[in-house]
Structure formats: structure tokens, C-alpha cells
Image (cartoon, grey):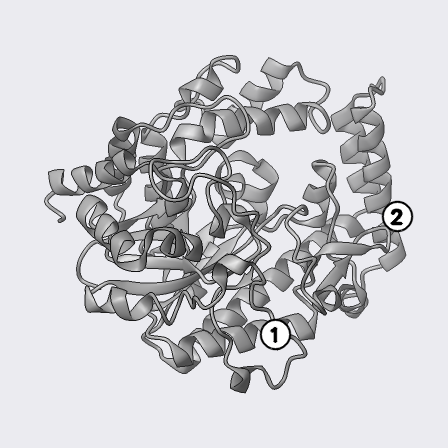
């Protein structure tokens, strides 16, 4: 694509609520959009539903209560090797609407490129619980219980995704696929007090093949969980929380060996998907979206997800760089660690220590003011430039034009959007990704994207 990439993430519900042609008119006229990233398969309201935190000035103004699934008609020819053959969204709103067959031809007539978009959300609360058979994909947690998310070593789950990609790429006029990464490792799930994944029979077999003592690893994860539960309940050991956490990791080195195995399984899965995309056409693109908790807030995940390692199987990157709500999100993250891993520190101490370790001092305000101050737009510039330098790949920073937050957060204004778009291009971006979802965005903020692009002579 020789022109500047101007993409937007969008769900089927917006086309249903507002009409295909009307939505495309708005996107082109206001924001200069030339690429659609369609959530054609999702169980997440944030990625495919109506706005989750207040409705914008367009679309239907009440919740859709998304159940989710496929918002396209799966072609049975591509699902012969998987038991998961029927997974169309049961929501009445999607009846007789195929978001790929009904949108792509209209978009292509306008010269717009189209990608499918899927995000493996981190939330254990987003579950395809209605889907018959989906439980057979699920992982196990460190206590041996059935987990809430699929296992990336489960061959049935991988076969199903191979089928979905094959269907998408053979039946529709697509430019490629955007795959969003939000998974956290088992240790990070325990750090945040959530249910873990990565312990089903496939992971156990892989661990044994690597010579990892399975029982020792499980004992280590359980010991760390029990310890952090006691910390959250108010226990403060004399030697300090952080010291005893490190002691547990030193006593159970199998935990970090398991963490590396878990990370390797994710890299392997993404390599498979990249290879499948290129098998059907070397010209197809495989983009990788990187969650803001990974690229910005969490020092362990920053260390674990080395961005350079993705370059061999990513044509481009979409880093989530939502600078307006970043102040509130970082404050929430720091508070969650101060309640557990960093409980030795004061709330201010944990907040500023994390900011310093993560290189965020130049972008943040005080802990009290941070949620309503956001991050400065220069954060977008610096993080974009770093990702380009690390990977040598095109970067389309995700600018949050309407993404909400459950608590107090800085207002997302046209000025904020203009500054974020300019900052991305100042950092060397090859384009911009309007995020998180069209259904959340105020039209004035979409117009601000277009204004910034016109100011730079890009549209």
C-alpha cells in the first residue's frame, strides 16, 4: 500500500445499526480511512459490540448484550478437520447479516482495503460459554481445574483457527489479518489474582519433554499464589514481600522454566498463523497488535514479550498507545501491584518506582492527578520510534479515539487525538490505527484524525 495507512477497528454491529454505506461515508469523509479492520469473529463487547462505557453521538444508544461468535457465514468446506463447525453468533441482531460478504464488496468499490481482526483478550470474564463444544479447547489452571481460556498447545484449537483463516483468505477479498496479543503468562495471572492457563495435558507433556519437574513447577506456582493471597489479605512479613517473592522464585526455578515454555508456545502459534497467511498468498499481510499492558505498564511482560522476536513473522505492528486514558490505566495497574507484589512500598512509592523502571517519568503526572491528566502525546512518538527501531517493520500506532475506562479518566478530545496522530508520525509511523472500536468513537474525534492527516498533507 503506497498511500498512508489509515485503518479503523470496527465490529459488525456498527454496519447493522447505521448501514454499510453510511458508515463507509463517515469513515472516508471525516477520517480519511482507507483500511477496515473488521472483528468478524469475537466474544468481546470491547472489540465487536456497542460501546461499553457510554454511547457516542452515532449508532444505537443502548447495550447489545453481545453473545458473540462468527459474524460471517462459515464455509463448511474449510472445517472438515475440526469438530467446531458451527459457531455463528446466535444474537438476533446478526441474523441475515454477513459482515464479510456484506461489507467487503462495498469497501473495495471505494478503494478501501479490508482485514479481519481478532484479539485474544486477557480477560477471563470474556467467555464463549454458549458455544457447544468450545469447552474442549479450554486449558487447565495451576490447580488442575478447567480454565477459562483456550490452550495454545491444544491441537484441536489450532486446527480450528487454521480452518477459520483458510475460510477467510480463500472466500473473501482481504488484504490480510490483524492478530491482537493480550495473553498474560501464568505467573502474571497469579500476580493479578486471576485464573491462570498453561497447565493442560499438552503443556504437561511439553514440560516433561524439556526435563521440567512438573510437580515442582506446580508447587511453586501454588506457593506464590498462596503467598500473594496472604499479602492481599493484609499480611506483611518482616523480611518484606518482594524479598520473599524472589525467594519463592529462587526456591522453585521450575516456575520460570515453565514461563519460558508458555511464551515459546505463543511464539509458535503466531508463527503458524503467519505461515498459513503466506501459504495462501505471499502478498497477504499478517499484522500483530500489542496490548498496552505488555508494551507499557507491566515490567515483567515488557521483559517477556521482546518486540524484536516478533519481527520475523509480522508484516507490521499495531501497538496500543492510548495516551488519553493511559494515566488512569497506569494508576490502576500500579495500585494493583502495590496491593500485592509491591506491598512494601507506599502507593506513591510503587507508582513512581514503576514509572521510573518503565521509562514513563516524562509522560506522567502525580498519582492523584494522573488519571485525569493522561500521558503526554510524546509517549506515542517515543514508543512508535522504539518499536520501529527494534523491529524494522512498519508501525501503525493505535490511537484511542473513544476507548472507555471504568473509573475517572481524561476526556478524549479532538485536540488530544490530533496531538496523538501527529506524535505517531513524528515517531516514524507509516500510518495510524483508529482504535479501539468505531462504535465507541465520537464523530468529532474521528474528524480530528482527518484534520491531522490534512495538516500533514496525507489526505
C-alpha separation, residue under disc 2 versus residue under disc 1? 39 Å
Q: Residue 129 versus residue 226: which sits nearer the camera?
A: 129
Dot 2 or dot 1, earlier in sequence: 1
Q: Residue 17 versus residue 211: which sits nearer the camera?
A: 17
316 shown above or below 294: below
163 vs 257, left or right, is: left
| x then y, percent, for residue 212 | 81, 60
State the residue at coordinates (74%, 49%): 196
178 vs 66, left or right, is: left
State the residue at coordinates (83%, 23%): 233
Q: Nearer the viewer, mark 2 or mark 1?
A: 1
Please tell me whether mark 2 sits on a helix, a strand or a loop.
helix
State the residue at coordinates (80%, 69%): 205
From this viewpoint, is residue 391 visible? no
Q: Residues within 10 Å of mark 2 (few under 14, many from 20)?
A: some
| x then y, percent, for residue 250 | 79, 41
Q: Residue 184 versus residue 238: which sits nearer the camera?
A: 184
| x then y, percent, for residue 455 | 12, 38
Q: Which residue is mark 2?
A: 219
379 vs 445, left or right, is: right
State the residue at coordinates (85%, 59%): 213
Q: Quadrant of residue 58?
A: top left
- Residue 86, numbered label: 1
- Residue 442, numbered label: none
Please tell me whether mark 1 sits on a helix, a strand or a loop.
loop
Q: Residue 59 versus residue 332: which sits nearer the camera?
A: 59
368 shown above or below 48: above
From this viewpoint, is residue 413 visible? yes
Amino acid at each position: 500500500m503506497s498511500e498512508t495507512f489509515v485503518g479503523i477497528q470496527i465490529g459488525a454491529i456498527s454496519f447493522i445499526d447505521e448501514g454499510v454505506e453510511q458508515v463507509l461515508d463517515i469513515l472516508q469523509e471525516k477520517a480519511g480511512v482507507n483500511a477496515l479492520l473488521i472483528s468478524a469473529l469475537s466474544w468481546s463487547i470491547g472489540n465487536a459490540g456497542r460501546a461499553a462505557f457510554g454511547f457516542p453521538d452515532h449508532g444505537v444508544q443502548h447495550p447489545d448484550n453481545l453473545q458473540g461468535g462468527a459474524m460471517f457465514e462459515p464455509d463448511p468446506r474449510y472445517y472438515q478437520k475440526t469438530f467446531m463447525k458451527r459457531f455463528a453468533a446466535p444474537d438476533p441482531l446478526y441474523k441475515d447479516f454477513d459482515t464479510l460478504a456484506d461489507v467487503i464488496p462495498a469497501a473495495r468499490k471505494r478503494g478501501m482495503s479490508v482485514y479481519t481482526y481478532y484479539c485474544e483478550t486477557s480477560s477471563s470474564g470474556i467467555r464463549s460459554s454458549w458455544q457447544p463444544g468450545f469447552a474442549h479447547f479450554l486449558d487447565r489452571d495451576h490447580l488442575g481445574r478447567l480454565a477459562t481460556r483456550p490452550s495454545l498447545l491444544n491441537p484441536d484449537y489450532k486446527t480450528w483457527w487454521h480452518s477459520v483463516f483458510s475460510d477467510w483468505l480463500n472466500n473473501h477479498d482481504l488484504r490480510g489479518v490483524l492478530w491482537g496479543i493480550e495473553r498474560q503468562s501464568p505467573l502474571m495471572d497469579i500476580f493479578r489474582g486471576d485464573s491462570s492457563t498453561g497447565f493442560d495435558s499438552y503443556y504437561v507433556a511439553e514440560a516433561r519433554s524439556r526435563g521440567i519437574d512438573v510437580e515442582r513447577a506446580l508447587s511453586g506456582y501454588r506457593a506464590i499464589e498462596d503467598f500473594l493471597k496472604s499479602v492481599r489479605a493484609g499480611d506483611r512479613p518482616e523480611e518484606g514481600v518482594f524479598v520473599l517473592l524472589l525467594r519463592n522464585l529462587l526456591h522453585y526455578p521450575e516456575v520460570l522454566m515453565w514461563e519460558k515454555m508458555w511464551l515459546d508456545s505463543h511464539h509458535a502459534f503466531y508463527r503458524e498463523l503467519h505461515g498459513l497467511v503466506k501459504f495462501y498468498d505471499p502478498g497477504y499481510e499478517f499484522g500483530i497488535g500489542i496490548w498496552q499492558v505488555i508494551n507499557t505498564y507491566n515490567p515483567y511482560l515488557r521483559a517477556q514479550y521482546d518486540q524484536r522476536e516478533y519481527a520475523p513473522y509480522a508484516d507490521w505492528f499495531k501497538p496500543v498507545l492510548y495516551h488519553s486514558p493511559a494515566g488512569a490505566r497506569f494508576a490502576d495497574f500500579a495500585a494493583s501491584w502495590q496491593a500485592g507484589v509491591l506491598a512494601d512500598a507506599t502507593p506513591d512509592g510503587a507508582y513512581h518506582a514503576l514509572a521510573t523502571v518503565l521509562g514513563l517519568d516524562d509522560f506522567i503526572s502525580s498519582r492523584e492527578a494522573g488519571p485525569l491528566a493522561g500521558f503526554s502525546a510524546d509517549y506515542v512518538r517515543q514508543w512508535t520510534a522504539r518499536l520501529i527501531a527494534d523491529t524494522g517493520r512498519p508501525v501503525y500506532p493505535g490511537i484511542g479515539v473513544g476507548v472507555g475506562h471504568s473509573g475517572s479518566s481524561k476526556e478524549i478530545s479532538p485536540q488530544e487525538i490530533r496531538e496523538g496522530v501527529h506524535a505517531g508520525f513524528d515517531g516514524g509511523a507509516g500510518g495510524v490505527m483508529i482504535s479501539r472500536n468505531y462504535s465507541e468513537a465520537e464523530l468529532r474525534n474521528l474528524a480530528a484524525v482527518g484534520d491531522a492527516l490534512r495538516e500533514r498533507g496525507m489526505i
